[in-house]
């Protein structure tokens, strides 16, 4: 029996479709981050990108996100080592570190409902940029 594509291939060997399917759609990477000026530590906020649909946890304009949100980063296999800031539950980070996908991951369960039920998405936990006020007032630790 053949294993799943993410078990059989390295990240750099994945097709674009396989790479995209690794994203669990949690929305955590769409949260704004701050860098502590004293420690250079990166911290997450619960301030979501204005393009994030906070119910589905998906980008509302994925095809045009880089034009509409200049701070949006494209996560690619060739730069995965630069993304140490990705949440500890992120499939890209987990696989790059040699770890398995979490049991709630949509590739294992067939839908995003297990992820939401496990509390692994940003659903119900975030505020959009336009309504946030000072981001320093929104520092969180559950997304990192």
Image (tube, rainbow, N blue to C red):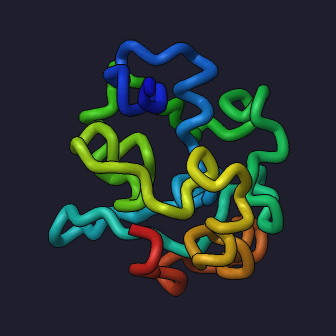
Question: What residue is at 33 percent from the left and 41 percent from the top?
Answer: 95
Residue 50, above or below 2? below
Foreground pick, 140 / 4: 4
Judged left or right of residue 79, residue 143 is right
Question: What residue is at 66 percent from the left and 80 percent from the top?
Answer: 125
Which quadrant of the figure contains the N terminus?
top left
Total numbered badges shown on the rendered structure:
0
Residue 120, above or below 8? below
Question: What residue is at 40 percent from the left and 64 percent from the top?
Answer: 34
Judged left or right of residue 87, residue 118 is right
Foreground pick, 14 / 2: 2
Which quadrant of the figure contains the C terminus?
bottom left
Choose top left, top right, bottom left or bottom right for residue 43: bottom left
Q: Looking at the picture, how far across and down is residue 25, in whole percent?
A: 65, 51
Foreground pick, 131 / 98: 98
Q: Looking at the picture, how far across and down is residue 62, in whole percent?
A: 76, 35
Q: Looking at the picture, how far across and down is residue 96, in whole percent?
A: 28, 37
Q: Residue furthest bottom?
A: 137
Q: Residue furthest left?
A: 39
Residue 9, above or below 126? above
Question: What residue is at 42 percent from the left and 30 percent from the top?
Answer: 3
């Amino acid at each position: 029996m053949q294993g799943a594509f993410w078990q059989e291939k390295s990240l750099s060997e994945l097709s674009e479709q396989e790479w995209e399917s690794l994203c669990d759609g949690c929305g955590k990477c769409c949260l704004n981050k701050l860098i502590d000026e004293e420690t250079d530590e990166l911290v997450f906020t619960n301030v979501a990108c204005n393009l994030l649909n906070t119910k589905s946890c998906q980008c509302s304009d994925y095809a045009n996100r880089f034009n509409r949100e200049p701070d949006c980063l494209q996560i690619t296999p060739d730069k995965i080592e630069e993304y140490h800031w990705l949440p500890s539950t992120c499939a890209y980070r987990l696989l790059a570190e040699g770890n398995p996908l979490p049991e709630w991951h949509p590739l294992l369960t067939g839908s995003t409902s297990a992820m939401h039920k496990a509390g692994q998405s940003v659903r119900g936990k975030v505020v959009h940029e336009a309504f946030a006020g000072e981001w320093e007032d929104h520092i969180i630790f559950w997304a990192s």
